[in-house]
Amino acid sequence: MRSHRRVLAVRFSALGDVAMALPVIYEACRANPDVEFLFLTRPLPARLFINKPENLRVLAVNTSEYSGLSGLRKLFKEIRRDFPFDVMLDLHDVLRTRVLRALCRLSGIPSFHIDKDRRGRKRLTSHKRKMLTPLTPTVSRYRNVFSKAGFETPETFKSIFAETGASPEGYAHLSSTKKEGDTWIGIAPFAAHKGKIYPPERMREVVSALSARPGHKIFLFGGGPDETRILSEWEAPNVYNVAAARLGLENELALISALDVMLSMDSANMHLAGLCGVRTISIWGATHPYAGFAGRSQSPADIIQTDLPCRPCSIFGNKPCRLGDYPCLNSISPETILSHLP
């Protein structure tokens, strides 16, 4: 019988992983209104938690200020002092969260943690003994942690804007209001690692072809000076550089919610679109949706990939290509991508 009254859930990074966890957290909060939930994360992903349930408090911490064992002890003591919790849910299972779990154990506080199935990941990416079988989706793994602690997480989440709607005011200076019959397409052509990025020169062909379609507006998403510069070179009539507009995360989410479809890599933007209930078409290279990181409620028909014996070679796309030329990405033609888009 569950008796917990204040729950600490932890996932420090990355943005996409926290975006995958958010619906589960909201569902747990709404299904257990008598329980206070704390979510510990970093400042950037903390900004995702808009329109949150009343019984959810997000704790944003700069982990560099709590480095090492002494820093984690300090963090643990501060949280326990300000928000005495009686159970910890570790949605990350890295060294930092393992230390926090150990401190919980020493304090008599139960904890539950995610099972990442590292052996399954190793088999999936093996070069010689590959086992190409789907692993449990990461979102399901998050649900399992809550379930082990006795909390229901009914799959009721639709959109981060489901109850309030998204205001267009925050992006009004970028584009006029969407008209009936318009088709708005978001394109997020970048990712954290080369093994997940479709060749930019080919993606530019996709952008050019889409912008020529009647009634189409194309919104380019990215971050950082290099990506912003590249996207600025792609600007044209009906092509808008969201990265240069500096809308802020909440306004970007509002814009995403107005899209008809988001085209992305295996990246955070795929999961941000999922938070907004927007159809997502994703391109996969070195990584594979079988690893459990596909977009929320994404249809298999909206996953663009080439079946190669070397895929996937990596869970995160951070390993150099054994063949040197990334055939997993270069084998996908712009025409193939265009055929998936309205």
Image (cartoon, helix red, strand yellow):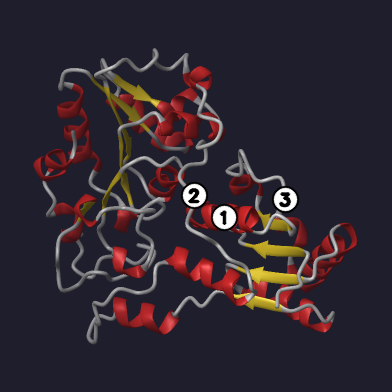
Say which residue label 1 marks.
27
Q: How far apart are the alpha carbons under marks 2 and 3? A: 16 Å
Q: Position of residue 300 (x, y in %)?
A: 23, 57
Q: Where in the figure is residue 145, as x and y percent of width and height?
A: 57, 72
Where the N terminus falls, by quadrant?
A: bottom right
Q: Which residue is mark 3?
A: 55
Q: Are marks 2 and 1 in contact (CB under 8 Å)?
A: yes
The secondary element bearing badge 2 is classed as loop
Under mark 1, the amino acid is Glu
Q: Quadrant of residue 132?
A: bottom left
Q: Secondary structure at mark 1?
A: helix
The residue pinned by badge 2 equals 157
Which mark sits nearer the N-terminus, 2 or 3? 3
> In which quadrant will I find the C terminus?
top left
Residue type at mark 2 is Phe
Dot 2 crowding, Cα within 10 Å, few <14, some 14–19, many 20+: some
Amino acid carrying label 3: it is: Asn
Query: Which sits in the foreground, 28 or 321?
Result: 28
- Specify whether residue 287 is in view: no
Q: Distance from label 2 to label 1 (Cα)? A: 7 Å
* Residue neighbourhood size for the residue with mark 3, other residues' Cα within 10 Å, grouped as few (<14), some (14–19), many (≥20): some
Q: Which mark is residue 336?
A: none
Q: Would residue 12 appear left or right of 285 to someone viewing this image?
A: right
Q: Along the horizontal axis of the image, is 130 left or right of 309?
A: right
